[in-house]
Amino acid sequence: MNKKKIIILVSLAAIALIVILFYNAQPKDFPNDKQLIENMNGHYPEAGALKVQAATRLDERHAVVPFISSDDHYGVSYWIWKGLKWKLARVDTGEPKLWKLNANDPSTYYLVWNIDPKDQLNRINYYLIGPRGYSITQKPESNIYTPKIQKQFSSAVEEQTYGVLQLPEEWVQIMSSSLQLNKARQPSDIFQNRSFGSPIHVAWMPINQAEEMKNPIYTFNGGHYQLEKINLDYLQIINQDELELP
């Protein structure tokens, strides 16, 4: 083996080692409140972040930071470990959203919110909704019926405005089964498969202190700014007449 080939092999090995270390380096300590505020306001001055309410690590490489702005708005910032440092991925308003750390694994889905107290909400009702439907597959021939899905749980927001919750295990199982079923339905020919009914989704209902549904206008107030790509779903508000009584 000549000298030139040796140099090339050594260079490739060095590059491979650097790449491995780059992507597998253990995250450092999370930034403190002052650093978080400076980072948010430095990238997105309109955020006007004044106070960090909490910092929640979802895993080693993802974190959520709810905050209050200088003009008394309630927001959420999303952080990821990337390129050997913690990076601000997104600054957003506080209405509930679903952060999918891994879109193919519902066990990594997290509900995130920060409700403005001026909306005077008592709680949030979360729903997993899946309408009745069926699909017809010609190759192989089969008819698949999907029953109505309606699951619910609630989270209080009167005393603590913010929260981060992993989806309930039952919801994870349902959504995982739905993902697998959708993959199985992928047609090799567009005319071989017909599906009826929309996919499973998460929705929410804001409930005020009078036990009535209320539009949280203050929570929706504000803008957003994204620096890094993350899989963040906005959740639709569901009305009472869209629900089935038990």
Image: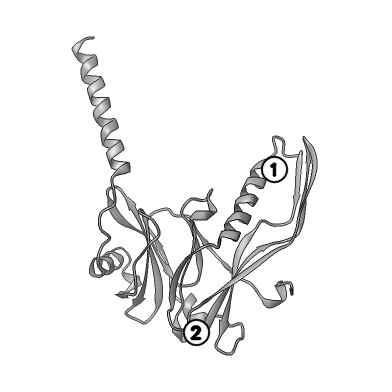
The amino acid type found where label 2 is placed reads Asp
The C terminus lies in which quarter of the figure? bottom right
Q: Which quarter of the figure is the N terminus placed in?
A: top left
Residue in front for this viewpoint, 8 or 14: 14
Give how far across and how far down residue 184 sits, in percent.
Answer: 67, 41
Residue drawn at 24 percent across, 15 percent down: 5
Determine the secondary structure under disc 2.
helix
Most extreme residue toward the bottom is 210
Q: Earlier in the sequence, mark 2 or mark 1?
A: 2
Lateral position of residue 227 relative to residue 151, left or right? left
Residue 237 located left or right of residue 138: left
Q: Residue sitting at 27 percent across and 26 percent down? A: 12
> To which residue does mark 2 refer?
119
The CA distance from mark 2 to mark 1 is 43 Å
Report the side of 215 relative to 52 (left or right): right
- For disc 1, the marked residue is 185
Which mark lies nearer to you, 2 or 1?
Answer: 1
Seen in the picture, residue 19 relative to 119 is either above or below; the reply is above
Amino acid on which disc 1 is placed: Arg
Label 1 crowd bin: few (<14), some (14–19), many (20+), radius 10 Å: some
Label 2 CA crowd tier, 10 Å (few <14, some 14–19, many 20+): some
Image coordinates of residue 49 in percent, x first then y, are 31, 73
- Most extreme residue toward the top, as rendered? 1
From the top left corner, tell me how far across and down residue 197 is, in percent: 73, 56
Figure check: 238 above or below 109: below
From the viewer's perspective, is 148 left or right of 41?
Answer: right
Instruction: Looking at this view, name the residue that lies furthest to the front.
Output: 169
Secondary structure state at the residue bearing disc 1: loop
Above or below — where is 161 with respect to 57? Answer: below
Q: Nearer the viewer, residue 108 or 112?
A: 108
